[in-house]
Image (cartoon, helix red, strand yellow):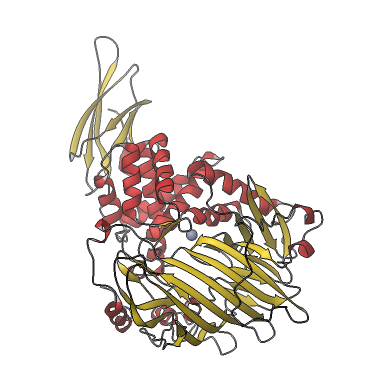
């Protein structure tokens, strides 16, 4: 089914739990994970040394004999699954990165309950997945402690992470435990198509960096100086909201022995806490400029670079506020105490819990990435299985914002682009796993554009009120949990009181296309002076949707699945035109045949 990397898939398949088609019927659980991390960034040698202690409690009904971790930085180096995937498409970006430039994440030692363990790399030479065999099986309810020493370095060619001079975007940097859920271990090499999936975890992280570094991170700084006050733009030093006590008064940090109790000359240590997040990311640069404030009781931190005219003077800060207010209005209250928006090295943007790394300060990008803090962050889906749940929904909500704020026609372009794509027969089912899309463009269309259009169709079908209630229900029922398409459908069905299998099956699970056409439209004057127009509507595609027919301002919703429907519409004056789907809320592959002058 999947042409790439058959050996790796075989290796990983061996370690996965047996296929469980009935996974959704099993009771939900999520594992209990806490990390204590000490890390020192040597920005002369351009390497981070880390030590982590992870406590893992098995809340699943299964006994585990191995724990799996991801070392995502190892994607950005020669011979990784990522680099070899790029080779298949004629790209050599990471395959050709030299020894000083590629990323790495290298485990120096690992112990389980204090005893040395041997890391295994089932996808070698790719090393983004590492298996740690347990000395004793971990029964349901039992806990185990795993200690790592490792070194890490982002790549100079940035991709979802990066380094340039003394600026580091540490999106990935520590051995992060893979998700064990109702489908078993969710392990996959990190690839260009598809992103992440994480366990909800608590973090207690002490970073030891050069004293002039300015840091933005997941979590709140509870001890030490992240550098914001010294880096504040003129007038912004007084508005810094550290929120140091948001998790109560923290006890002394557990010492792991990598860092001295007091930082060395020219160094500083900053301790961060974060709860209920599935990653801990951070970015640091001595050049960052700080601006910050609040939205309601939520702290906002913005870190930008000299010359960033589009970020400065509260612009990025205010757009972050705009995004938070919008998202609060459609989903509900944010689940975490702060959000940090940093100007990363790479263009585009990538989302992390409580942290967005953005290449620009455009409102669209901020809406998209802060939106991901809801969909993917707080509602944590598996992004390489169901990327449409986060990328599609955040693309949808961003368009929705623009539609209601001065760009009423914004959907037309998406529907047109998608119709052309569907006409060309290029769609694959949205539920396709990300790596199985035939190429990167298809992955993008099926993960961002088409699902956004599909959510728009659902919104138009249910109406704003029922759809809005469904979104809020989806959030309220599932926040800080792993989510699937089934959870989204259930929330929409409960909120709307309708069985929506017909909709979700067609638009998420098949490539059925839809085409309604006005085959004929004739009118006749009645004795009372009104006009009765007889319209024959034909459906040629496999898919169907309730569709609106408009005859000179008089609208009728056609709800039949019939191939041919004959409809009568009465108008006071002689009508001139019959139009199907006048508002463009149905993904109709051919809109040319949607209008017809009336004979
Ligand atoms: Zn996105």
Which residue is more in the foreground, 362 or 104?
Answer: 104
Residue 243 horizontal/vertical position (percent): 66, 55
Point out the residue furthest to the right here.
234
Q: Is residue 581 left or right of residue 152?
A: left
**Residue found 74% across the figure and 82% down from its top:** 264
**Residue found 23% across the figure and 66% down from its top:** 20
In the rendered image, which quarter is residue 236 located in? bottom right
Q: Is residue 461 left or right of residue 45?
A: left
Residue 339 horizontal/vertical position (percent): 60, 56
Residue 368 shows in the view: yes
In the rendered image, which quarter is residue 492 located in? top left
Which residue is more in the foreground, 133 or 356?
Answer: 133
Residue 245 horizontal/vertical position (percent): 65, 56
The image shows a total of numbered marks equal to 0
**Residue found 62% across the figure and 59% down from its top:** 340
Vertical arrangement, residue 337 with respect to residue 525, above or below: below
């Amino acid at each position: 089914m999947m042409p790439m990397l058959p050996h790796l898939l075989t290796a990983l398949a061996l370690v996965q739990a047996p296929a469980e088609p009935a996974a959704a019927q099993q009771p939900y659980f999520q594992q209990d994970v806490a990390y204590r991390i000490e890390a020192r960034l040597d920005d002369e040698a351009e390497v981070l040394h880390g030590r982590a202690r992870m406590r893992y409690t098995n809340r699943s009904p299964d006994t585990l004999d191995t724990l799996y971790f991801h070392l995502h930085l190892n994607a950005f180096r020669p011979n990784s699954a990522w680099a070899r995937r790029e080779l298949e498409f004629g790209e050599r970006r990471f395959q050709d990165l030299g020894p000083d430039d590629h990323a790495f994440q290298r485990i120096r030692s690992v112990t389980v309950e204090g005893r040395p363990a041997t890391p295994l790399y089932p996808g070698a030479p790719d090393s983004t997945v590492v298996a740690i065999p347990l000395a004793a099986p971990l029964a349901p309810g039992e806990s185990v402690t795993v200690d790592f020493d490792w070194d890490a370095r982002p790549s100079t060619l940035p991709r979802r992470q990066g380094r340039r001079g003394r600026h580091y975007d540490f999106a990935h940097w520590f051995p992060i435990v893979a998700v064990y859920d109702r489908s078993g271990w969710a392990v996959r090499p990190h690839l260009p198509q598809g992103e992440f999936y994480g366990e909800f975890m608590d973090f207690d992280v002490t970073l030891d960096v050069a004293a002039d570094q300015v840091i933005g991170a997941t979590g709140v700084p509870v001890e030490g100086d992240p550098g914001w006050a010294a880096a504040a733009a003129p007038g912004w030093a007084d508005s810094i909201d550290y929120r140091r006590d948001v998790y109560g008064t923290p006890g002394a940090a557990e010492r792991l022995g990598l860092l001295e109790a007091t930082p060395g000359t020219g160094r500083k240590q900053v301790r961060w806490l974060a709860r209920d997040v599935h990653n801990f990311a951070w970015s640091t640069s001595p050049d960052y400029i700080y601006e910050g404030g609040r939205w309601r009781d939520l702290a906002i931190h913005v870190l930008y670079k000299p010359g960033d005219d589009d970020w400065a003077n509260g612009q990025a800060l205010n757009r972050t506020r705009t995004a938070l207010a919008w998202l609060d209005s459609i989903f509900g209250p944010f689940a975490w105490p702060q959000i940090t928006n940093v100007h990363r090295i790479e263009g585009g943007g990538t989302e992390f819990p409580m942290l967005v790394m953005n290449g620009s300060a455009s409102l669209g990008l901020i809406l998209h990435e802060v939106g991901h803090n809801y969909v993917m962050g707080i509602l944590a889906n598996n992004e390489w299985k169901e990327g449409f749940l986060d990328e599609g929904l955040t693309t949808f909500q961003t368009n929705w914002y623009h539609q209601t704020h001065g760009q009423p026609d914004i959907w037309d372009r998406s529907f047109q682009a998608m119709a052309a794509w569907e006409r060309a027969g290029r769609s694959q089912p949205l539920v396709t796993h990300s790596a199985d899309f035939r190429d990167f463009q298809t992955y993008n269309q099926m993960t961002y554009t088409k699902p956004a259009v599909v959510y728009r169709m659902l919104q138009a079908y249910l109406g704003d009120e029922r759809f809005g209630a469904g979104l809020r229900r989806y959030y309220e029922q599932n926040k800080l949990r792993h989510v699937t398409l089934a959870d989204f459908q259930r929330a929409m069905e409960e909120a709307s009181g309708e069985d929506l299998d017909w909709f979700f099956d067609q638009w998420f699970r098949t490539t059925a296309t839809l085409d309604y056409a006005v085959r004929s439209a004739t009118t006749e004057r009645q004795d009372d002076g009104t006009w009765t127009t007889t319209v024959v509507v034909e459906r040629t595609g496999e898919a169907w949707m309730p569709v609106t027919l408009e005859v000179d301002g008089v609208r009728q919703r056609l709800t039949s699945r019939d191939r041919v429907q004959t409809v009568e519409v009465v108008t006071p004056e002689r009508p001139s035109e019959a139009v199907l789907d006048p508002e463009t809320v149905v993904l109709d592959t051919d809109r040319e045949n949607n209008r017809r002058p009336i004979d």
